[in-house]
Amino acid sequence: MRTRPGGRRDQAHLVTEARQSRSAEINQRERRYLLMMGMRLVCFVVTVVMFVNHAGWLTVIPAVGAIALPYFAVVVANTRRAVSPGEFRAYQPRLPERYVPPPPPPPPADPNQPGDGGT
């Protein structure tokens, strides 16, 4: 990593936490919208079939779904993933503690020095 003149380092971003690309986000939103509109189509067909077969007040249930689903499809398709400022985490490598070698052993005592108790 480079160090800036002010002493700050550039922060490395984790790739797994990176935002989706714009095209991938739009593709995902379109799929959600089309899925919900497909559910609306199914509700509409079920409503027509139930109405033709004189299902009575039960016909209202899929009809409400067919009427309400377009609103929810637009709202859900237009929502983005919320990005909060606390969501970013800088890369923190999991390194072991730095190895510090043990101090060298003391040198052996010289038998010719006085005060050792030698002969």
Image (cartoon, grey):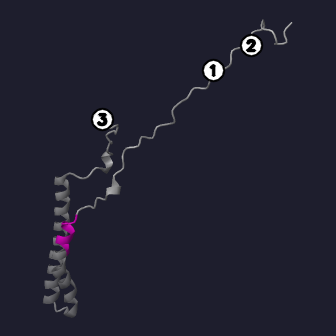
The dot on residue 104 is 1
Closer to us: mark 3 or mark 2?
3
The alpha-carbon separation of the residues under discs 3 and 1 comes to: 40 Å
Callout 3–callout 1 Cβ contact below 8 Å: no
Q: Where's residue 22, x and y in %? A: 18, 53
Mark 3 lies on residue: 5
Question: Along the horizontal axis of the image, is 58 left or right of 89?
Answer: left
> Which amino acid, by three-letter code, is at mark 3?
Pro
Q: Where's residue 7, x and y in %? A: 35, 37
The dot on residue 20 is none
Q: Earlier in the sequence, mark 2 or mark 1?
A: 1
The residue furthest front is 6
Question: Along the horizontal axis of the image, is 78 left or right of 117?
Answer: left
User: Picture quarter containing residue 70?
Assistant: bottom left
Asked if residue 73 is among those painted magenta in the image, a careful observer would answer yes
Q: Earlier in the sequence, mark 3 or mark 1?
A: 3
Which of 27 and 47 lies nearest the eye of the viewer? 27
Asked if residue 87 is among those painted magenta in the image, a careful observer would answer no
Closer to us: mark 3 or mark 1?
3
Mark 2 lies on residue: 109
Residue appearing at x 21%, y 93% in the figure: 57
Magenta span covers which residues? 72-79
Image height of 92 relative to 78, above or below: above
Which of 115 and 90 lies nearest the eye of the viewer? 115
Q: Earlier in the sequence, mark 3 or mark 2?
A: 3
Q: Circle 3 sits in a helix, a strand or a loop, which is it?
A: loop
Q: Where's residue 58, x and y in %? A: 22, 90
> Which amino acid, by three-letter code, is at mark 2?
Ala
> Which amino acid, by three-letter code, is at mark 1?
Pro
